[in-house]
Image (tube, coloured by chain):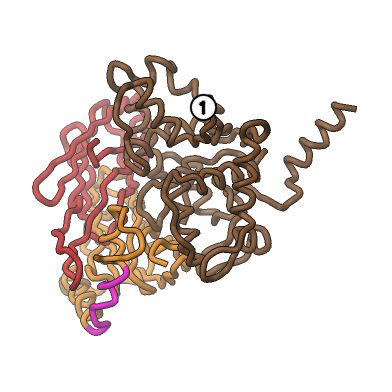
Amino acid sequence: MSSPISPRFAETPRRAVLLLPLAALPARAQEESFTAAERALLAGRVPVDGGITLDIPTLSENGNSVDLSVRVDSPWTLRDHVTAIHVLSERNPVPRVASFHLSHRAGRAEIATRIRLATTQQVTVLAETSTGQVHRAAREVIVILGACVEGG
Amino acid sequence: MKRAAAALLCCMGLAQADGVRPARDFLSPELRAQQDDPSRHPGWLWVDEGEALWRAGERSCQSCHGDVAAMAGVAARYPAVAADGALLNLELRIERCREEQQGAPRFGYESQALLSLTAAIAQRSRGLAMSVPVDGAAAPFLERGREFYATRQGQLNLSCGQCHDENAGRRLRGDVISSGIGTGYPAYRLEWNTLGSLHRRLRACSLGVRAEQLPLGGADYLALELYLAHRARGMPMEAPGIRR
Amino acid sequence: MTDFTARITMPETARRGDVVPIRVIIRHPMEREITAEGLTPLPRRIIHSFRVTYAGEEVFRMALSAGVTANPYVAFTTIATETGTLHFEWLEDGGAVHRREARLVVTA
């Protein structure tokens, strides 16, 4: 029904969903939802460029799994440390990919995870500090299809 | 004289006159590092599950075979011909054990339980050199596998070797074409979001050349698996691998 | 077989004040909502929240969306303060809660 290729695998409906509707959201609507999400997180604050090391491949292995790690420079005192790191996607169906909430007990701002990217796009990271500052970094990631995928 | 011949064979095995290289050589440095790091490799979730299954129940695998550590080297010698003349890969060997020794129903090819047990056993051969017996009863299966490998198939009319020998190391869409050996399977494929068997991967190969996708555990893929294992002789086992 | 398993990688011991790296992989399909025409509709079923306490105090929290990869991986840090138990708690759509724990021995 969903895919004529390999109906025996339970993954088929999810794969089909990756292939079909991610591109269905018009670019305009995606941009608007990304901008709205970023604006809500900033809550009127003006982000400062820099202070963030965003490690993400320029060319992804597969959009299903893109490695991402973030390190934020911080004096790391009780008064001045990082409290949150947000990962935003420009062209996924959901713009807020993940948020990490840190306390002083983290010791430093260094996190890693793996994310899904529907298509080639910019990934944005916002880092909030306990002094009310927001740092911002962004990187373009190219998402390509592999060869010999089950969906052909 | 005999020793010199053996040494020569050994060298050829290592140097692989046909240019076959370990699967890991074709991975990006990042994926290779993840394959080597259980703390970042989701395939180990299945290894854990498989080791639990190994010990589970009254007539557990462990009750006959002892600790799963005793399985070191076993996967490097599969597929193998059983006493009744059937060619069995590791998955089918486990299934047969289930039925005959444990009196339990088969797990089913590509089931999570079978993938987990296969991964747990194969992992114990990690780093060991592939060495499947291909003489005697195995010889006709090897020939069948070699023939399958060499036969042009599908609407694209391609043989396995046209990609995996003649173009290994070159790019195809987003991938690098490997030597096409199965040493990393069962493998965690990013495209699948899960662990999968070599035969599942072969079905994707068949689709890639627009040929008929054959049944998991079927005779053609089994014979091919034996030939691939022979092609990989001397190469290190990598299961559970990470693949794109 | 359950479809949730977890692997937590962290040292068993640390010196007081050390920043301890913690890596966690869980087995979960992180199923996205399916609404597209021609496909059987499916509700979203993901792990949406991950929380870690250490000796009773929250030290890390993560909000996840369907944009996080299946079988999620996360790495973070915590300062070794005292010998105690780290509790890991995952919340899933539909209300299921998964819990694991790990002990950290802290030396002077």
- Please give the residue where the numbered disc 1 appears in the rendered image: B84
Above or below B73: residue A45: below
Query: Given the current orientation, which residue lies at the most extreme bottom position?
Result: A28
Prevailing secondary structure class for the magenta stretch in the rendered image: helix
The residue under the point 29% across, 76% down is A23
- The amino acid pointed to by label 1 is Asp
- Residue B65, given in percent of the width and then of the height, sits at 44, 17
Q: Which chain is orange?
A: A
Residue in the foreground of this view, choosing between A106 and B30: B30
Label 1 lies in what chain? B
What colour is chain B?
brown
- Residue C27, given in percent of the width and then of the height, sits at 29, 44
Give the extent of the magenta segment.
A19-28
Residue in the foreground of this view, choosing between B37 and A134: B37
**Mark 1 nearby-residue class (10 Å; few <14, some 14–19, many ≥20):** few
- Residue C17, given in percent of the width and then of the height, sits at 34, 35
Q: Decide if residue B183 is on the left or right side of residue B200.
A: right
Q: Is residue B129 visible?
A: no
**Residue A21 belongs to magenta span:** yes
